[in-house]
Amino acid sequence: MTDSDETSWIHWFCKQRGNEFFCEVDEDYIHDKFNLNFLDSNVTNYRCALEVILDLNSGSASDAPAEPELEASAEKLYGLIHARFILTNRGIELMLEKYNKGEFGTCPRAFCQGQPVLPIGLSDNPGEDMVRIYCPKCNDVYIPKAARHSNLDGAFFGSGFPHMLFMVNPDARPRRTKQKFVPRLYGFKIHQMAYRTLAEIQKDMTPIGEIDTPSHN
């Protein structure tokens, strides 16, 4: 952390390049131990990492882990707390504001016409997959456009977040697009049969010698 001492760790972390998908979790939420149940089993140096997030100084620097290791633990712990926080009314409110501003980017699909997207995880278990972006218009997921966002763990956003947001705010969900791309050649639609391989065609052709002939016995 390089900013002034007056800047909270949470504010500093969320302003770092590559962390734009995060919202600032309320410290009151983190202070409530009920909201942190079972997270200590997923994060090494849990107690020290929590103190870093909350800008607390325990005064036990002698047994503190190395700074890079501690920062990594703090970032992981914050990410897991964030995944829970954005399912609350307050968290949804903050993320909806970012969504409406297009801060998560737009859908790369041409027919979605620049529809804003939301971050989503394909797994709720940390370390399994990176964050993806979910488009509510085509109901599909994509890799974030910026490489710096592709390095974020998907578990820091969770697999159910976008759906919870639209359940709480149904008016924010766009109408699903029905427009689909239709392949054409010289103005004519291309039939699916045109894409069959030679092997598929040969497989469907029954050799003459194998055609059953009636018995004359």
Image (tube, rainbow, N blue to C red):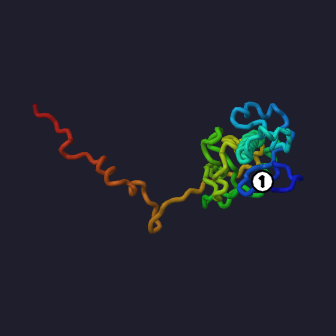
Residue 171 place in picture, x, y as percent? 76, 48
Residue, far right: 6
Residue, far front: 62
Residue 192 place in picture, x, y as percent? 42, 54
Residue 27 visible: yes
In the rendered image of this protein, does residue 2 appear above or below residue 159?
below
Residue 79 visible: no
According to the image, label 1 marks what residue? 98
Q: Nearer the viewer, residue 89 or 197?
A: 89
Q: Nearer the viewer, residue 129 or 212?
A: 129
* Quarter assignment of residue 146: bottom right
The number of discs equals 1
Position of 179 compared to 16: left or right? Answer: left
Q: Nearer the viewer, residue 20 or 68?
A: 68
Look at label 1 and name its amino acid.
Answer: Lys
Seen at 74% across and 41% down, the residue is 65
Residue, far left: 217
Seen at 73% across and 34% down, the residue is 39
- How crowded pointer 1 is (Cα within 10 Å; few <14, some 14-19, many 20+) is rated as some
Residue 151 place in picture, x, y as percent? 64, 51
- Say what secondary structure mark 1 lies in: helix
Seen at 79% across and 34% down, the residue is 35
Seen at 63% across and 53% down, the residue is 150
Task: Give the position of the C terminus as an image quadrant.
Answer: top left
Position of 205 compared to 105: left or right? Answer: left
In the rendered image of this protein, does residue 199 appear above or below residue 82?
below
Residue 101 place in picture, x, y as percent? 77, 57
